[in-house]
Every structure is written in C-alpha cells, then in structure tokens.
Image (cartoon, rainbow, N blue to C red):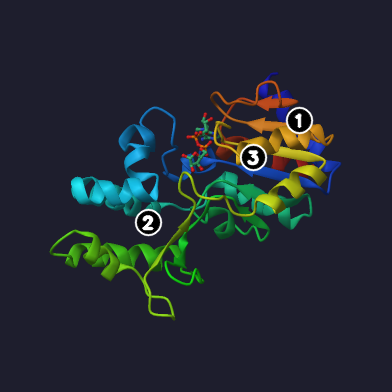
C-alpha cells in the first residue's frame, strides 16, 4: 500500500478506537540513537548474545575476557546516556493524552516511552534503570542519567575490573545486598506476561512498532490480538515476522510515520 494512503487509513482506524494497544521493539528507539539488535551493525553484530545476554554467559565472559564486558558496559552507557525520546515516542504520548492509546507493551528497556509521557507502559523485558536486589528481589527505580552517571564514574575510578569490583560498584538494597539492572536476560522469565496478553486479547487495534517479532513469548502478541478480532497495523522500514499478520503495513520509520498519523487525527 502506498505510504500516504496507509497513513490516511491508519488515522481513520485510530479515530474510531479507544482501545489501541501498541507493541514496540528496538526499532522504536533507533531514531534516539540506540542501535537495534538484529539490523546490520546492531548490538548482536557488536557483541555475542551468548557472552553478554545471559547471566551465566556474562559471568563466564567476565572471568575469561573481562575487557569484553567492560566494552559492553561502556557502549551501553554511551548509547543510553545520549538517548532522548524521539518524535515517534512523543507521538505515542499524544495518542495516550487524547484517549486513543490505552497501553504501551514494550520489549525495550530504555525508559523512553515513560520519558515521552506514556503512563500505562508494560515492560516485558524490564527496565535498565530500575534495580533489583540480588538477595531479597526488592526493586528500586533510578533515573536514567542518575544510574548511568553513577556507573560511568565508578568505572572511571575502578583500578581492577573484576567481579568483586563490579559488585562493589552496584547500588545497594536497603537489605545491604547489591542490586542488578531489572532487565530480563535470555532464559529468564519475562515480566508483565499476563497483563500483556490481557491487553492483546481485549484491544481492538494493535499497533506493532519496530520489532522483528522473533523473540517469544512477547512476539506472540500481534497474532494473539488478531485472533481476538483486532486490526493489526505495523510500522517498520524493514522485515519482520508479521507480514501475514498485519492488516495494514506502513513501510517506514516510527519517528517519521507516527507524528504524521497524529497530525492527520488532530487536523481532522
Ligand atoms: N523505525 C521502525 N522500525 C525500525 C527502525 C525505525 N527507525 N529501524 C529499524 N527498525 C526495525 C527493523 O526493521 C527490525 O524489524 O526494528 C526491528 C528491530 O528488530 P530487533 O533488532 O530484532 O529488535 P527487537 O524486535 O526489539 O528484539 C526483540 O530481542 O535481543 C532481544 O531482548 C532483546 O527485546 C529484544 C528482543
């Protein structure tokens, strides 16, 4: 479908609903300078998920090749410290404000949906800046810049880069134990699974934004929404697993297309 017609059609669909749910992935934050995982040059091109994407993998790599973990942490700080909500995030904030968007279900851990003003955000893969106690599992939110600044300073002062010095660097829980980022690593249980499937089941439009759709159980949501009778609309400049699922597919970036849809709705 020609992009202009697709934007028109999506705006018409949005105007008829109060139960729009979005499902977002790394592509949503690409225009905030955060690399996606599977695009050329993405995170899994730079780092091996087996070495940095699981708890055992991280610990194993830290003992055998600590410089790889240091490089991974430094790159994470560099990328996430400069990131800001992009026009795509801000457009979703507006859609929630005008009562069309009911919830954001995201695979992203960058906190940018919340910083763009969305209140109802379900983070299936956690949040990099919320910390979770390694002992009592208590959780504590940190600001993005506060947490990254703290880690950046601690790394700069660190003389030996090893597990004890990393544990020393981590923020402490009220119970005294170290706290790790509350992100879901491969092999760990996702968060908000029940709520996310509830949203997919009960929405009448699901907007799929910047995800390749290859990591389950999150990736099952668009198909779930379709089976429950929802209209599925996808925005993606490249490929994804949703060709047969999306009713309307807009070929382009979320940062460019979402504001144009909101503009059509507000100028109507
Ligand atoms: N706007 C919209 N979509 C984009 C943009 C953009 N500017 N740039 C890239 N994309 C699309 C790509 O075409 C691709 O389909 O975003 C998608 C990114 O796919 P992935 O890199 O696989 O990211 P994601 O789907 O979020 O990965 C899911 O995998 O590694 C795990 O936990 C990690 O949450 C992540 C999960």
Q: Position of residue 243 (x, y in %)?
A: 66, 21
**Dot 2 crowding, Cα within 10 Å, few <14, some 14–19, many 20+:** some
What's the residue at 13%, 64% (across, down)?
159
Say which residue label 2 marks: 81
Residue 209 spot, x, y in % from top left: 61, 37
Which of 99/207 is in front? Answer: 207
Q: Residues within 10 Å of mark 1 (few under 14, many from 20)?
A: some
- Whether the residues at callouts 1 and 3 have beta carbons within 8 Å, the answer is no
Res. 266 in view: no
Task: Where is residue 242? Give x, y as percent.
Answer: 65, 26
Looking at the image, do the residues carrying marks 2 and 1 touch, with CB atoms under 8 Å apart? no
Q: Quadrant of residue 164?
A: bottom left
State left or right for residue 56 relative to residue 248: left
Decide which of tag 2 and tag 3 comes sooner along the chain: 2
Q: State left or right for residue 159 relative to residue 268.
A: left
Q: Quadrant of residue 212?
A: top right
Q: Residue at x 70, y 21 (%)?
A: 244
Image quarter of the N terminus = top right
Residue at x-position 46% and y-position 46%: 32
Of the pair 231 and 118, the residue shown nearer to us: 231
Q: Would residue 238 be visible to someone looking at this image? A: yes
Name the residue rendered at 65%, 54% in the picture.
93
Q: Which residue is mark 3?
A: 258
Q: What residue is disc 1 on?
A: 8
Residue in front for this viewpoint, 177 or 249? 177
Cβ–Cβ under 8 Å for marks 2 and 3: no
**Earlier residue among tags 2 and 1:** 1
């Amino acid at each position: 479908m020609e992009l202009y017609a697709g934007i028109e059609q999506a705006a018409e669909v949005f105007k008829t609903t109060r139960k729009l749910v979005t499902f977002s992935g790394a592509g949503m934050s690409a225009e905030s300078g955060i690399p996606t995982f599977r695009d050329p040059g993405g995170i899994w091109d730079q780092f091996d998920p087996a070495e940095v994407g699981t708890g055992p993998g991280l610990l194993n790599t830290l003992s055998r090749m600590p410089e790889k973990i240091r490089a991974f942490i430094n790159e994470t700080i560099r990328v996430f410290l400069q990131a800001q909500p992009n026009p795509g995030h801000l457009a979703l904030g507006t859609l929630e404000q005008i009562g069309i968007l009911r919830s954001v279900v995201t695979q992203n851990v960058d906190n940018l949906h919340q910083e763009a003003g969305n209140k109802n955000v379900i983070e299936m893969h956690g949040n990099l800046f919320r910390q979770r106690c390694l002992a009592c599992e208590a959780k504590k939110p940190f600001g993005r810049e506060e947490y990254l600044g703290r880690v950046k300073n601690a790394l700069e002062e660190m003389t030996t880069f090893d597990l004890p010095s990393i544990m020393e660097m981590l923020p402490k829980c009220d119970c005294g134990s170290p706290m790790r980022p509350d992100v879901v690593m491969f092999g760990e249980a996702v968060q908000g699974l029940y709520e996310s499937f509830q949203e997919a089941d009960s929405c009448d439009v699901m907007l799929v934004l910047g995800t390749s759709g290859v990591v389950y159980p999150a990736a099952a949501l668009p198909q779930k929404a379709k089976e429950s009778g929802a209209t599925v609309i996808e925005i993606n400049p490249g490929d994804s697993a949703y060709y047969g699922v999306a009713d309307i597919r807009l070929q382009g970036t979320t940062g460019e297309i979402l504001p144009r849809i909101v503009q059509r709705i507000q100028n109507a």
